Image: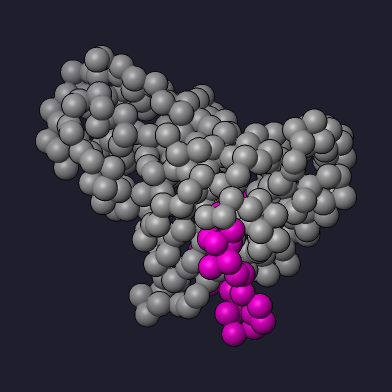
């Protein structure tokens, strides 16, 4: 095998709670993560030496600052791979959107190189390498539906969530994850998301139980800074969404729909009202 092509799927947070601030400055979280069909495409090709990265979007770096490049460098060092790798990255996941776009690209590189160079690493070993690149990378290696704890790296695989149509929309604003977590005032949060209840709902296959527990404590910070997020949530819920929520630290909003036609109609109306928003209709992605 001289080349391989992979899909790198985006993620959303069906529920996100921050438990406490750790002494090292990080935060302990409890989240239910879900991959969706929206994805980047990566083509990896063996070369004689080095790492070459080509990206079709000017919004993402095409050098050693890209997590895909860092993943290739880390795996080459970890496994002593002497040959080189060329990475062609087709971006479809919006950049800095709270959907783990960079992390999922890194995960795809790790999985692809493992197969391309016949390294024989298990998923658990890949996750151990991936966490050095970021807390979301191990989850992106796994995919599907999962409970994430710790700083996001402690993962419990859950059954696939019931099929659902998802409308995702990213407004044209930038959000600093670091700022959001530093600004979050846990003492002021009166009600935390029922993550344990959501996990039970996933295990029971109850989409209604999942939707009724969709909450994200980080909205308390990001929505105050960017009212457009609140506006998109309300728009989705007024146009057929069973529930709309911000993903991660934002600014992307997603809405859960029963019917794809309703989601596509809502997307069309949203783009007329807010033409600068990036929107896509997709669905939950099952673990491969």
Q: Is residue 6 visible?
A: yes
70 in magenta: no
- Vertical placement of 8 versus 158: above or below? above
Q: How is the image coloured?
A: one colour
Seen at 37% across and 42% down, the residue is 141
- Vertical placement of 107 versus 250: above or below? above
- Vertical placement of 97 versus 278: above or below? below
Q: Is residue 55 visible?
A: no
Q: Is residue 148 left or right of residue 161?
A: left
Please state the extent of the stretch shown in magenta in the rendering.
174-202
Which quadrant is home to the N terminus?
top left
Seen at 18% across and 18% down, the residue is 48
Q: Nearer the viewer, residue 250 or 286?
A: 286
Name the spot of residue 176 as percent of width and height, x first: 56, 58
Seen at 46% across and 52% down, the residue is 158
Q: Quadrant of residue 192?
A: bottom right
Q: Is residue 113 left or right of residue 282?
A: left
Seen at 23% across and 46% down, the residue is 125
**Number of disc labels:** 0
């Amino acid at each position: 095998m001289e080349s391989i092509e992979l899909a790198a799927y985006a993620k959303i947070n069906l529920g996100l709670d921050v438990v406490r601030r750790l002494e090292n400055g990080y935060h302990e979280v409890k989240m239910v993560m879900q991959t969706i069909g929206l994805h980047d495409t990566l083509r990896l090709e063996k070369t004689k030496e080095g790492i070459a990265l080509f990206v079709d979007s000017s919004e993402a770096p095409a050098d050693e600052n890209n997590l895909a490049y860092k993943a290739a460098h880390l795996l080459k060092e970890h496994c002593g791979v002497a040959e080189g790798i060329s990475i062609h990255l087709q971006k479809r996941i919006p950049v800095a959107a709270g959907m783990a776009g960079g992390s999922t690209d890194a995960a795809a590189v790790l999985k692809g190189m493992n197969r391309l160079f016949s390294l024989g690493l298990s998923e658990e070993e890949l996750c151990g390498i991936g966490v050095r690149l970021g807390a979301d990378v191990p989850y992106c290696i796994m995919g599907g539906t999962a409970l994430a704890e710790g700083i996001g790296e402690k993962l419990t695989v859950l059954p696939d969530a019931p099929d659902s149509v998802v409308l995702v929309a990213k407004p044209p604003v930038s959000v600093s994850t670091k700022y959001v977590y530093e600004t979050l005032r846990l003492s002021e949060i009166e009600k935390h998301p029922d993550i344990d209840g959501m996990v039970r709902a996933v295990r029971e296959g109850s989409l209604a139980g999942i939707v009724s527990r969709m909450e994200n404590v980080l909205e308390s910070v990001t929505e105050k800074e960017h009212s457009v997020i609140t506006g998109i949530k309300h728009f989705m819920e007024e146009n057929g969404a069973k529930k709309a929520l911000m993903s991660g630290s934002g600014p992307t909003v997603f809405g859960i729909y029963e019917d794809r036609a309703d989601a596509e109609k809502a997307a069309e109306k949203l783009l007329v009202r807010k033409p600068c928003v990036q929107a896509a209709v997709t669905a939950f992605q099952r673990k491969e």
